[in-house]
Image (spheres, rainbow, N blue to C red):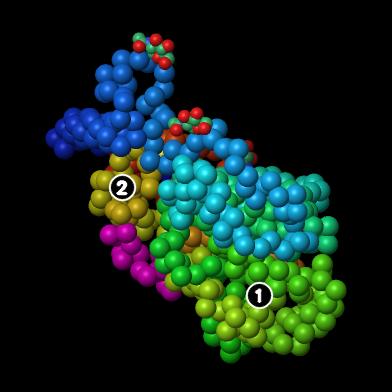
């Protein structure tokens, strides 16, 4: 059983003793700098003394670079006032790019940083889970996504209803995406994630700058699409879709292959005969997407980014057995780099990214390629935690044991920001307070 070995006798060096003073100096410099920035750009009428002397108001909390005015909704008409506008797939939505940009002009506090704004949607079916631990596992999977969103400043929505009665299945995501695009004109990207997918690198930031020329970003492998014609050539368990007209058109074409289409039967047969390894009946969302890439590459392909550079689609079976080694590799780096061990407020944890990037080479290119980087997302393909009807090839409780480990592996990255950790990845019930400067001491290791 893995546990923390903690050595309390580690001697404090000179460096350790002066560290608090250096820290205080840096913090006060930052404070002065940030106040200066606010007073210069956002709140020119505030004087520094107002901020420091009046403790009954929280002026200090309000001015931020990403300040959103949630009370500002001017009376000018927008697409929301159009009685014909529909949130559902029943009615096409035209001219969306103009409509959305008019809305943004009327809501300038949301317009400034719009291109980096991600809205995460996930969800499960409306009924209670059949498996006795199903709802517990789904709750923990949701907590994992909520933690990630809080750390990176994204909003999140949990869909617990079928917005389209014919799509109360793997296709439910498409109706949720469509409604979310209309509900969130301030979000540039809608990020769909399956309920049972788990984010296993809480520090990883989606490299949006790579996708400027694309509207759909999905894990995928061109050779599996165009040569093997495999239904697993892309993964619809987690993907980003831009909030724009192209995407609405794409959703319409895509759902034309779903159970809400009069041609569903035709598509089910076509997919089965076209794709080399599709064994089960019915046109599912993933096979349909592979088909669209295969047959309508010219029309859609250019705008679809097949992401296979970072490990965005980790398969749990390949990952779980390597956790202790991954943890050790990360500790090794943290032992060398004091900045990575430094405690900090959760809200500024993204400040570590640049530091980590310098040492990522030590971990090899990527987990899937023999490296030791944490996979960004781990998928529980075939586990079905809600129904409990896992793939019979996964023996006994292996799915649930693995989910517990994966969730605790991710949770440790979060709890650390709160001063705690699970000493045993196999049991989320216990936590352990982390000592100052963890894991500076070589004995402070998960063994
Ligand atoms: C502090 O701010 C509140 C609200 O703006 C104001 O009513 C109060 O008079 C201020 N107090 C001082 C000491 O400036
Ligand atoms: C936010 O919007 C409201 C309503 O339009 C306005 O009164 C208020 O001044 C705005 N707040 C800021 C900080 O701009
Ligand atoms: C997990 O730890 C708790 C508290 O120590 C204990 O009661 C529980 O039995 C453990 N669960 C497993 C599966 O070992």
Q: Label 2 crowding class (10 Å Cα cut-off): few <14, some 14-19, many 20+?
A: many
Q: Residue at x 77, y 85 (%)?
A: 270
Q: In the picture shown, does residue 445 fall above or below 270?
A: above
Residue 252 placed where, x, y %?
A: 71, 69
Residue 273 placed where, x, y %?
A: 76, 88
Residue 115 placed where, x, y %?
A: 46, 56
**How far apart are the two marked residues, 2 and 1, measured between alpha carbons?**
41 Å
Label of residue 112 in the image: none
Q: Which residue is mark 2?
A: 340
- Quarter of the render that holds ligand 1: top left
Residue 122 versus residue 97: which sits nearer the camera? 97
Residue 19 placement, left or right of 409: left
Q: Earlier in the sequence, mark 2 or mark 1?
A: 1
Label 2 C-beta lies within 8 Å of the nearest ligand 3 atom: no
Q: Residue at x 72, y 63 (%)?
A: 92
Residue 76 placement, left or right of 423: right
Q: Residue furthest front?
A: 76
Label of residue 289 in the image: 1
In the image, the segment drawn in magenta is 357-374
Residue 403 versus residue 80: which sits nearer the camera? 80
Residue 379 in view of the camera: no
* 359 in magenta: yes
């Amino acid at each position: 059983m893995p546990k923390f070995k903690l050595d309390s006798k580690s001697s404090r060096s000179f460096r350790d003793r002066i560290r608090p003073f250096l820290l205080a100096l840096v913090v006060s410099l930052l404070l002065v700098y940030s106040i200066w920035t606010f007073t210069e750009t956002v709140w020119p009428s505030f004087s520094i003394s107002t901020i420091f002397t009046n403790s009954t108001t929280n002026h200090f909390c309000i001015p931020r670079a990403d300040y959103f005015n949630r009370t500002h909704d001017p009376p000018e008409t927008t697409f929301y006032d159009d009685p014909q506008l529909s949130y559902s797939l029943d009615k096409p939505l035209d001219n969306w790019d103009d409509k959305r940009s008019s809305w943004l002009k009327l809501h300038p506090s949301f317009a400034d940083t719009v291109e980096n704004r991600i809205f995460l949607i996930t969800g499960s079916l409306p009924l209670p889970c059949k498996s006795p631990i199903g709802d517990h596992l789904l709750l923990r999977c949701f907590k994992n996504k909520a933690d990630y969103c809080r750390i990176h400043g994204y909003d999140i929505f949990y869909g617990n209803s079928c917005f389209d009665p014919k799509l109360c299945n793997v296709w439910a995501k498409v109706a949720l995406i469509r409604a979310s695009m209309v509900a969130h004109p301030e979000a540039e990207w809608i990020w769909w994630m399956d309920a049972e997918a788990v984010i296993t690198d809480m520090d990883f930031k989606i490299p949006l700058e790579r996708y400027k020329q694309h509207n759909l970003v999905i894990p995928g492998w061109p050779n599996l699409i165009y040569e093997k014609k495999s239904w697993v050539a892309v993964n619809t368990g987690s993907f980003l879709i831009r909030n724009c007209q192209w995407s609405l058109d794409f959703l319409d074409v895509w759902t034309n292959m779903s159970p809400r289409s009069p041609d569903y039967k035709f598509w089910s047969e076509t997919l089965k005969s076209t794709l080399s390894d599709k064994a089960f009946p019915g046109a599912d969302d993933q096979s349909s997407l592979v088909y669209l890439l295969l047959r309508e590459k010219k029309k859609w392909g250019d705008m679809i980014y097949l992401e296979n550079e970072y490990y965005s689609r980790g398969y749990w079976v390949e990952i779980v057995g390597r956790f202790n080694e991954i943890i050790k590799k990360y500790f090794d780096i943290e032992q060398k780099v004091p900045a990575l061990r430094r405690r900090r407020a959760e809200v500024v944890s993204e400040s570590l990214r640049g530091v980590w990037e310098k040492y990522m080479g030590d971990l090899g290119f990527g987990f899937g390629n023999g490296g030791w980087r944490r996979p960004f997302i781990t998928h529980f393909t075939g586990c079905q935690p809600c129904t409990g009807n896992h793939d019979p090839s996964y023996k006994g409780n292996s799915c649930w044991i693995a989910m517990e480990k994966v969730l605790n592996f991710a949770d440790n990255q979060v709890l650390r920001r709160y001063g705690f950790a699970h000493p045993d990845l196999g049991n989320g019930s216990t936590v352990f307070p982390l000592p100052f400067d963890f894991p500076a001491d070589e004995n402070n290791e998960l063994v």
